[in-house]
Image: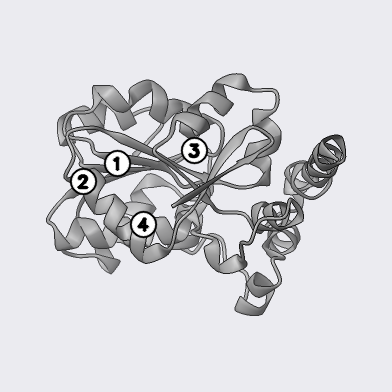
Amino acid sequence: MTEYNLLGVKVNVIAEHLLKNKLLEFLNSDKTHQIATINPEFVVSSQKNKEFLKIINQSSISLIDGTGIIKALQYMGHKVSLDDRITGARLTEILIDKAINQDLKIMFCLYSEGWTKTDQFFMTIKAKYPSLDFQVADENTALAKAKLFAPEIMLVGFGAPKQDIWISENIKQIPKLKIAAGVGGTFDFMSGKMKRAPKFIQSFGLEWLWRLILQPNRLFRINRAIIQFPYLIYRNKRKKQ
């Protein structure tokens, strides 16, 4: 696993097969591990939100979710490619597979004001993974449910920085928990509320444009990703030169 520093934010590059081994190591450890999935918005937000920055940098792994992170690392002279992305959606698939194969409990925490509702998501997961031992909650019930259910794996989709701060504040209160990860909008993809960008759009790193077409109200967030973030990266490189 390689670690980079992008505007003060820790970014890890790790091959998927090595990540799977690392997750197994986490699940067998006596500690609880927080995982972050980084995109350009994270980096922009962390420049002012020092609590968020500290949480990312103290996480066990900070995976690359957004294509913009890859482009920025390349611009800074690092040898990375789009193949080095491990998105929140892919991390979720890997952890569900671990939970099924090792008979572990997993909990999905959704944002109550998001597109996907807890009861609908419960039925979606039950139909797709009938052997999975899981619970679904929102931000209002997550901690109480988790204390009773005692999952080994928790996936939180409140959006950043809320999800990552929530994990950091509550991770030690949940018995038996080994891995907690912020996975952003993953649950909307899983429920079918949001369609993934076609493969050819993903290959060009234009998922942000796809999301903007489907959700015009994301314009402010897109601005941070495609205007503020590149500017900060450019300014940082110029300073170093």
In the rendered view, does 18 fall on the left or right side of 100? Answer: right
Residue at the left extreme, as displayed = 103
Question: Dividing the picture into quarters, in which one does residue 223 lie?
Answer: top right
Q: CA distance from mark 3 to mark 2?
A: 23 Å
Q: CA distance from mark 4 to mark 2?
A: 12 Å
Residue for badge 1: 179
Q: Is residue 196 visible?
A: no
Q: Nearer the viewer, mark 4 or mark 2?
A: 4
Q: Is residue 99 visible?
A: yes
Measured from the top left, where is residue 166 in percent x and y?
A: 43, 27
The three-letter code of the residue at mark 1 reads Ile
The three-letter code of the residue at mark 4 reads Leu
Tell me whether circle 2 and circle 1 mark residues in contact (CB < 8 Å).
Answer: yes
Residue at the front extreme, as displayed = 241
Measured from the top left, where is residue 164 in percent x and y?
A: 47, 32
Measured from the top left, where is residue 240 in percent x and y?
A: 81, 37
Q: Nearer the viewer, mark 3 or mark 2?
A: 2
The three-letter code of the residue at mark 2 reads Leu
Vertical arrangement, residue 20 with respect to residue 106, above or below: below
Residue for badge 4: 19
Q: Earlier in the sequence, mark 2 or mark 1?
A: 2
Residue for badge 3: 158
In the rendered view, does 19 fall on the left or right side of 104? Answer: right
Q: CA distance from mark 2 to mark 1?
A: 7 Å
Q: CA distance from mark 3 to mark 4?
A: 24 Å
Q: Residues within 10 Å of mark 1 (few under 14, many from 20)?
A: many
Q: Earlier in the sequence, mark 4 or mark 2?
A: 4
Q: CA distance from mark 3 to mark 1?
A: 16 Å
The C terminus - image quarter: top right
Q: Earlier in the sequence, mark 3 or mark 2?
A: 2
Marker disc for residue 27 = 2
